Image (spheres, grey):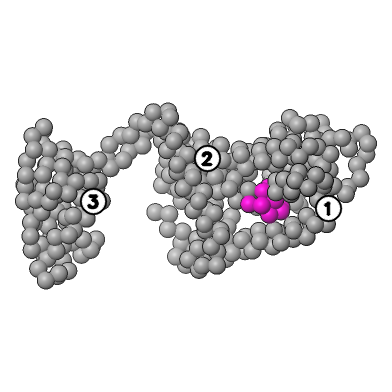
Amino acid sequence: MSFFVAFLAFSALIILHEAGHFFAAKATGMRVERFFLFFPPKLVSFKRGETEYGIGSIPLGGFVRITGMNPDEELPPEIAARGYYHQPVWKRIVVIGAGPAVNIFIAFLIFFVLSFGLQEPSQQVDRIAADTPAVGKLQPGDTIVSVDGVKGDQTAIADQINSHECAGGSKEDGCSAATPAVVVIDRNGSQVTEKITPVYDAKVERNRLGFAFGLEDVNPSVGGAAKNSLDFMWFVTTQTVSAITHLYRAEDREQVSGVVGTYEVTRQAVDIGARQAWTLIALISLSLGIINLFPFLPLDGGHIFWSIVEKFRGKPVPFAVMERAGMIGFALVIGLFLLGLSNDIGRLTGEGFNVR
């Protein structure tokens, strides 16, 4: 069931991407010949008006075919005026850019909605483990003000506790630190100071007191949710571009996933929960938008790039030039596909996808 949901989610992102091209083309007066989910050979189709709608048999994407996308193509006079290369450059950029724009907007919308109802770590003690130094010293509901005078978030507090090492730097499980941690807490509005000696936990390889922080609800404003969404999307964008441009490094090549990996990771996220699944769908949508904007044919960014070149030249770019450049872009796309497929096979037969 989860694989079916993942398949539907991936298909929906493709349809919405192609719908961006389709509706933009229609709005700018271009003639759309075909609107397909997946690539040929064709499984099923029907025609409505001047457009054929269908489903292909190779689930690697989709396509919208607009009349006259080959500038050397001879078109009948009655449809020539609605051909792609008979349109102004700005119209072509709008049509091609609409697909990635839809993916990016979907990602923003999902991240924006998910910003509400989030929980983030609090400074409040949630629970205390049995037979640990915190027993009898801390209580659920206590707020950690500082440790040894150090204030900060959970990481800062945990690092300060961990700085109390066992005598001689011993890493023996259960050994007590040589010095106690001075913990200042807020309990029901009053500050209390406790001296608690951390013990070393070999399972996590840290010195601990034995308590866990809780979570608190985050209720951002509409503007705050939008800003958080945009900030996260920018972070993901820079990381994606960095990974693609550093594929010469083995550790970056290992992170590339293909269609199989995308399906499997989405399926696992569906199993974990709705929030995780929607987050992953947003990330995939954003990645589709970003990667499609890379300036290589046959990607959308390649069409936009050559349209801009034409605008600066003041005349069309010879199709033979774009065709040769497209071969380079096609080789890069196929290379990424094969790399992703190779990684997917390795994960499926070996270490798995490690979503959890």
Q: Residues within 10 Å of mark 3 (few under 14, many from 20)?
A: some
Picture quadrant of residue 275: top left
Q: Give the residue number, with chain letter if any, for mark 3.
A: 156
In the image, 315: left or right of 184? right
Q: Residues within 10 Å of mark 2 (few under 14, many from 20)?
A: many
Q: Residue at x 45, y 33 (%)?
A: 226
Residue 195 or 3: which is nearer the viewer?
A: 195
Q: Give the residue number, with chain letter if any, for mark 2.
A: 107
Q: Amino acid at mark 3?
A: Ala
Q: CA distance from mark 3 to mark 2?
A: 32 Å
Q: Amino acid at mark 1?
A: Pro
For residue 318, say whether it is visible: yes
In the image, 88: left or right of 289? right
* Of pointers 2 and 1, the one earlier in the residue sequence: 2
Q: CA distance from mark 3 to mark 1?
A: 60 Å
Where is residue 244 shown, x and y percent of the image? 56, 58
Where is residue 125 shown, x and y percent of the image? 18, 42
Residue 218 or 234: which is nearer the viewer?
A: 234
185 vs 117: above or below: below
* Foreground: disc 2 or disc 1: 1
Q: Secondary structure at mark 3?
A: helix
Which residues, given as a range, are shown in magenta? 294-302
